[in-house]
Amino acid sequence: MKKNIYVLVIIVLLFSCKDKGERIDSNPNENFNIENKITLEDGSLIKLSEEKAGTFSIIIHGGAGTILKKNMSPEKEAAYKAKLEEAIKVGYNILKNGGTSLDAVQKTINIMEDSPLFNAGKGAVFTNAGTNEHDASIMDGSTLNAGASAGTTIVKNPINLARAVMENSSHIMLSGHGANTFAKEQGLQIVNPNYFYTERHHKSLEKIKEKEKTELDHDDKLTFYDEDIKDSKFGTVGCAALDKNGNLAAGTSTGGMTNKRWGRIGDSPIIGAGTYANNKTCAVSSTGWGEYFIRGMVAYDISALMAYKGLSLKQASQEVIQNKLTQLGGTGGIVAIDKNGNMVSEFNTAGMYRATMNAKGELTIGIYKKE
């Protein structure tokens, strides 16, 4: 009786897969994931369709805050959208060609780090001492391994250093002089600190110091608002991705807070606050008022709500950003992707630079709240 039931199940399975996959011979050299095939009683295999198996997607942000269309010239808006598109397509092509989510996250963030438009890498804002200090982190959702760096001053691409810390050291976070030294030993690209100088950010620092105010990028509660500098400061960059093997990864990079003092470190290099990834739930990158994201462990909290309460990515993100973070007094947002490729951008500010691409190559780019 059991044998008859088994045969019946196999027949049903074969017919149900007729239009969704293809039957292939068992071949140890066949190049596809073992999770994407079904073994039949005779040892042959059924390969599932690409739509069901091997899906991938990617989402990025370039900072969240008081970003209003009335303050944005058409030329500047076009420049941001073009750079967001350039960055996300780098990661998309890596994923499309079977690359890892870690590679996609790193290379996508590199594009934004190399642009003066964003507060990361080349476009980092200035500290009170007139220097540029960078923070970054990256996390592998398949192993829960992570790497981070804080307060570096000579590393061209801080996200590369974060990954080197993850893969080539026994530590999670390195900071300051030690992190700079490690970067040199790893053969990462080192630049003169003058590389990070941008005239508009330096002028912003000078005006803020005159008012003796501490400025959080994009935030109207803390920013010294001036007609000349209203659009001159742009926040943290980040990326979350799902690859064809079902592995999630996330990364975040920033120049921190304008006029920061005493070696201040925000949420971007803090695993669980600025970055988190777990294959069982989601991958998250944060942007906003760092102190509040640390207090709320925002990135991890979204994953925890999914794991322990069974919330969807959208539900968890809304709860954390719109309720928990807002009640604390924090502002900012996140981009995230779950294990099924669903993507979310959630923020409680007037805008957030963001973009998404799915396995079909569909691209969306947004800046303002209502779009």
Image (cartoon, rainbow, N blue to C red):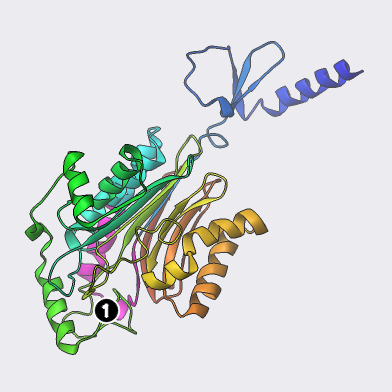
Q: Nearer the viewer, residue 211 or 219?
A: 211
Looking at the rendered structure, the secondary structure element under dot 1 is loop
- Three-letter residue code for mark 1: Glu
Where residue 162 sits in the image (x, y, percent)?
Answer: 30, 48
In the foreground, 105 or 172: 172
Side (left or right) of 331 relative to 227: right
226 over 120 or under it: above or below: below
**Residue at left 29%, top 45%?**
107
Q: Position of residue 349 (x, y in %)?
A: 41, 75
Q: Residue at x 29, y 42 (%)?
A: 164
Residue 206 point in image, percent of width and height: 12, 80
Q: Tell me the crowding category of disc 1: few under 14, some 14 to 19, or many 20 or more residues within 10 angstroms, Cα based.
A: many
Please say if 64 is above or below 329.
above
Q: How many numbered discs, if any?
A: 1
- Per the rendered image, the range of residues in magenta is 62-86
- Can see residue 5? yes
Compared to residue 71, the image places residue 286 above or below, namely above
Whether 227 is among the magenta residues is no
The residue under label 1 is 215
Residue at 69% of width from left, 10% of height from top?
A: 42
The answer to if 67 sits in the magenta stretch is yes
Position of the C terminus, as image quadrant, is bottom left
Magenta segment's dominant SS is helix
Q: Quadrant of the N terminus?
A: top right
| Residue occupying the far bottom of the picture | 211
Q: Quadrant of residue 230?
A: bottom left
